[in-house]
Amino acid sequence: MKISLTKGASEGPTKLNAFDNALLDANIGNVNLIPVSSMLPAEVEKIPMPELKPAEMTNCVLSHQYSDNPGDEITAVIAYALTEEMGCVVETKAINKPLKQLEEEARFMAEYMVEKRNLEIIEYECISQTHTVEDKASVIAALIYHDPIRH
């Protein structure tokens, strides 16, 4: 399976428009996002974010934060931990919380998920998006699945 990490931030005249603009900033604004739970197969290849076809059905794990309070610092974080057998994806978000604290929270959650499965992390990656709100703003961080779901 191929995956990509992406992130975006933007302002907008409404909550929906700020969110849509953040998705556009992350290059995932023209697709249909399908939220999935946080599991990865063992064989994962991380690739740079490709251009997606408009209206494509796109599976993802999404972290999103919004605020309309000027001066707020909003943050979205996504991370994944791979083991020999499988991977786990975690997301967190906050308003006015230190980035380092959120990244540590993501790491803790990933480590906990892996530990509960009696596995060991062989690879870990975390991305984050922070933005200081001017009027109405959204941030997103996402892990995008590029292979279709197989039944």
Image (cartoon, rainbow, N blue to C red):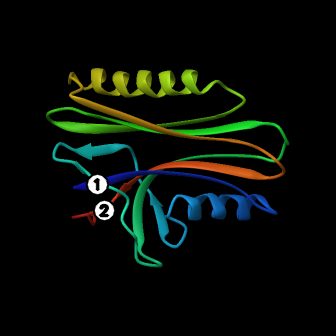
Direction from residue 22 to residue 26 in the image, left or right: left
Q: Reading the chain from its start, which is encountered first: label 2 or label 1?
A: 1
Question: Amino acid type of disc 2?
Answer: His
The residue depicted at 37 percent of the width and 28 percent of the height is 110
Residue 33: x and y in percent read 48, 64
- The disc placed on residue 146 is 2
Q: Is residue 151 visible?
A: no
**91 or 29: nearer the eye?**
29
**32 or 50: nearer the eye?**
50
Direction from residue 116 to residue 151 in the image, left or right: left
The mark tally for this picture is 2
Q: Secondary structure at mark 1?
A: loop
The residue depicted at 38 percent of the width and 59 percent of the height is 49
**Can you tell which quarter of the image residue 131 is in?**
top right
Question: Amino acid type of disc 1?
Answer: Ile
The residue depicted at 41 percent of the width and 53 percent of the height is 36
Residue 133: x and y in percent read 77, 44
Query: Marks 2 and 1: CB-CB under 8 Å?
Result: yes
Q: Between label 2 and label 1, give the one nearer the viewer.
A: 1
- The disc placed on residue 47 is 1
Question: Which image quadrant: the N terminus?
Answer: bottom left
Q: Secondary structure at mark 2?
A: loop
**Can you tell which quarter of the image residue 19 is in?**
bottom right
Direction from residue 14 to residue 74 in the image, left or right: left
Mark 2 closeness class: few <14, some 14–19, many ≥20 residues within 10 Å: some
Q: Identify the residue at the far bottom of this view.
A: 54
